């Protein structure tokens, strides 16, 4: 007797589809924010300057001034 | 390859301990992050950034790596598998994503702590609230998936189950010699 044809594999459940749509929308929002510049810079460089180098303590303290200034000396 | 029950319990206990520890450490980190961003007191802000670095380097990163690795061993050593059920697969992808972002973010936190220690006024630093809240949300989702285990077998899981059923049927119908 021949084997009966194998049943079709189950479809992805609804919670997986909904989650996939949410993740897709989030990725799209991040891409749009990145392209339009609305989200600002992202990644480690955001906190440390574009070069990734840390501002010096002198620059941060503004030379002898006690005022905080990234470009220093002011 | 299925682990024997004793070993399985040891691995599962380690997985729960490291995962819950990771979640708890992120809560503690979030408290420090909020303090760093909102406090008006310079020494408090400086201290918060220093404590954030210590928490990330000595608690969150080791716990996250241990949780991911032990989680993989746990999944592969049980009938759940790593790619057979959607909830396991989604949880795996989320934790790998969270751990990757964490490793990148750890460098940022170290930079911030260093900058906070040397700057006259660390209150201007941006903090990392978006990442700590995002990380917490991802970990809470994985926690919910682990407890509720929503239904759903992947195509791979379905094929494996089918193979197993066929093998069992073949074993039952084999003539006794």
Image: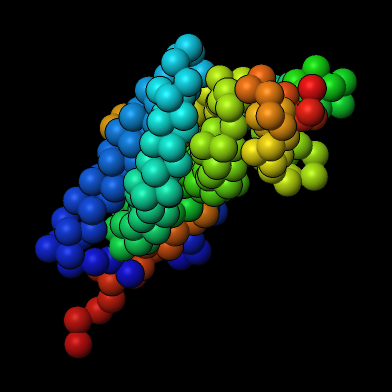
Q: Residue at x 80, y 17 (%)?
A: A38
Confirm whether residue A39 shows in the render: yes
Q: Position of residue A61 (x, y in %)?
A: 66, 29
Q: Quadrant of the N terminus of chain B?
A: bottom left
Q: Position of residue A30 (x, y in %)?
A: 73, 26
Q: Position of residue B35 (x, y in %)?
A: 42, 19
Residue farthest along the bottom direction in this orientation: B177
Residue farthest along the left direction in this orientation: B6
Residue farthest along the front direction in this orientation: A64
Q: Is A35 above or below relative to B83?
A: above
Residue situated in front as seen by the camera: B126 or B96 = B126
Q: Is B79 above or below relative to A13?
A: below
Confirm whether residue A14 shows in the render: no
Q: Residue at x 55, y 42 (%)?
A: B114
Question: How many labels were placed on the picture?
Answer: 0
* Position of residue B124 in the picture relative to residue A29 (left or right): left
Q: Residue at x 19, y 87 (%)?
A: B177
Q: Is A2 above or below relative to B118?
A: below
């Amino acid at each position: 007797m021949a084997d009966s044809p194998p049943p079709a594999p189950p479809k992805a459940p609804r919670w997986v589809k909904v989650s996939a749509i949410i993740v897709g929308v989030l990725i799209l929002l991040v891409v749009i924010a990145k392209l339009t510049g609305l989200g600002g810079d992202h990644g480690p460089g955001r906190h440390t300057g574009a070069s990734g180098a840390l501002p010096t303590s002198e620059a941060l303290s503004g030379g002898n001034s006690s005022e905080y200034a990234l470009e220093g000396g002011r | 390859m299925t682990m024997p029950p004793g070993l399985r319990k040891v691995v599962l206990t380690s997985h729960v301990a490291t995962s819950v520890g990771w979640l708890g450490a992120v809560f503690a980190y979030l408290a420090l992050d909020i303090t760093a961003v909102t406090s008006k007191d310079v020494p408090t802000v400086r201290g918060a950034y220093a404590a954030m670095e210590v928490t990330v380097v000595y608690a969150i990163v080791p716990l996250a790596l241990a949780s991911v690795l032990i989680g993989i061993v746990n999944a592969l050593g049980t009938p759940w598998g790593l790619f057979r059920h959607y909830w396991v697969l989604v949880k795996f992808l989320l934790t790998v994503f969270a751990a990757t972002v964490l490793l990148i973010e750890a460098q940022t936190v170290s930079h911030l702590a260093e900058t906070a220690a040397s700057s006259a006024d660390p209150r201007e630093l941006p903090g990392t609230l978006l990442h700590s809240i995002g990380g917490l949300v991802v970990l809470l989702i994985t926690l919910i998936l682990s407890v509720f285990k929503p239904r759903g077998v992947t195509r791979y899981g379905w094929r494996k189950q089918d193979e197993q059923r066929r093998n069992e049927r073949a074993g039952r119908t084999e003539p006794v010699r």
